[in-house]
Image: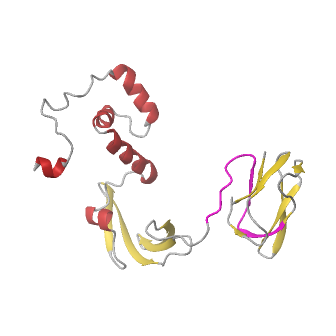
C-alpha cells in the first residue's frame, strides 16, 4: 500500500514530523499573519507549516471565492444540470435556493454566460471556460502609466503617431469608433513612442494597449 501511494518517494521511518525544525511562534506567526491576513489563526499557521503548498492553494481559492464549504459536496465537485435546484445553508435559518437555467456555448474568448435563479430571481454571470481553446487573439493589456489603452470597446479607426515620435501631454494618439461616434485618445504624459501595438481597423476591448511610450 505504501509503495502504491508514495511510488518512488522514500517514506519516513522515524517519528512523524521528526524531520521538521522547531517553530518560533513569536517570530514566524506575525509574518504568517501579514502574508495571509484572511486566515491568520494559530491553527491556520500550523496547517501552513505542515502543508505549505496545500494551504497556499486553499488560501488562494478562499481569497477568490470566499468560503465555499456550505455548497453541497456533489454540486461543488461535479456542478449541477439545467433545471436542477440546490439548497445552500450559510448558517442556521439562512438558506438560499439556486437553480441552473441555461449555460450558453463558449464565445471566441472562451467565455460562457450562466443563467440561473437565486431565490426565484433570474440572474446571469459570465465565466471563462478554461477547457475551451480560445480562437480570438488576445491583446496586451495596459498596466503602466506609459501604456495607453483603449478607454472602451470599439474599433481603432485612426493612428496619429508612429514608433519614434515625440509626443506631449494631451496630444492625440489614436481614434476609436464606438456606437457610431469617434473619439480621440490623448496622451496622459510626454514621451517618445516606443511601440504601436495595434493596427488601424482592429477591434479592441477596454484597456487593450494601443500605444506604449518611453
Above/below status of 114 relative to 18 = below
- Residue 100 location, quadrant: bottom left
Q: Position of residue 132 (x, y in %)?
A: 46, 71
**Principal secondary structure, stretch drawn in magenta:** loop
Residue 134 vs residue 65: left or right?
Answer: right
Residue 167 vs residue 10: left or right?
Answer: right
Residue 140 vs residue 131: left or right?
Answer: right
Magenta-span inclusion, residue 148: yes
Residue 64 vs residue 4: left or right?
Answer: right
Instruction: Identify the residue shown where x is 12% and y is 47%.
Output: 2
Magenta-span inclusion, residue 187: no
The residues colored magenta run 138-158
- Look at the image and tell me whether residue 121 can be seen: no
The one of 213 and 204 positioned closer to us in this rendering? 213
Q: Position of residue 52 (x, y in %)?
A: 33, 38
Q: Colour mode?
A: secondary structure
- Residue 210 location, quadrant: bottom right
Above/below status of 174 relative to 23 = below
The quarter of the picture where the C terminus appears is: top right
- Look at the image and tell me whether residue 70 can be seen: yes
The one of 126 and 97 positioned closer to us in this rendering? 126
Q: Position of residue 16 (x, y in %)?
A: 16, 32
Amino acid at each position: 500500500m505504501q509503495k502504491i501511494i508514495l511510488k518512488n518517494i522514500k517514506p519516513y521511518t522515524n517519528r512523524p514530523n521528526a524531520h521538521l525544525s522547531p517553530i518560533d511562534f513569536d517570530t514566524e506567526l506575525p509574518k504568517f499573519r501579514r502574508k495571509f491576513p484572511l486566515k491568520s489563526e494559530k491553527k491556520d499557521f500550523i496547517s501552513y507549516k505542515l502543508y505549505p503548498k496545500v494551504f497556499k492553494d486553499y488560501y488562494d481559492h478562499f481569497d477568490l471565492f470566499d468560503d465555499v464549504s456550505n455548497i453541497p459536496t456533489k454540486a461543488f465537485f461535479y456542478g449541477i444540470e439545467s433545471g436542477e435546484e440546490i439548497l445552500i445553508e450559510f448558517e442556521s435559518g439562512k438558506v438560499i435556493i439556486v437553480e441552473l437555467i441555461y449555460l450558453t456555448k463558449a464565445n471566441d474568448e472562451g467565455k460562457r454566460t450562466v443563467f440561473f435563479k437565486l431565490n426565484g430571481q433570474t440572474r446571469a454571470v459570465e465565466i471563462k471556460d478554461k477547457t475551451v481553446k480560445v480562437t480570438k487573439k488576445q491583446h496586451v493589456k495596459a498596466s503602466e502609466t506609459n501604456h495607453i489603452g483603449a478607454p472602451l470597446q470599439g474599433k481603432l479607426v485612426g493612428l496619429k503617431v508612429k514608433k519614434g515620435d515625440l509626443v506631449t501631454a494631451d496630444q492625440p494618439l489614436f481614434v476609436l469608433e464606438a456606437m457610431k461616434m469617434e473619439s480621440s485618445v490623448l496622451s496622459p504624459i510626454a514621451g517618445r513612442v516606443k511601440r504601436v501595438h495595434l493596427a488601424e481597423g482592429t477591434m479592441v476591448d477596454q484597456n487593450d494597449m494601443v500605444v506604449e511610450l518611453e
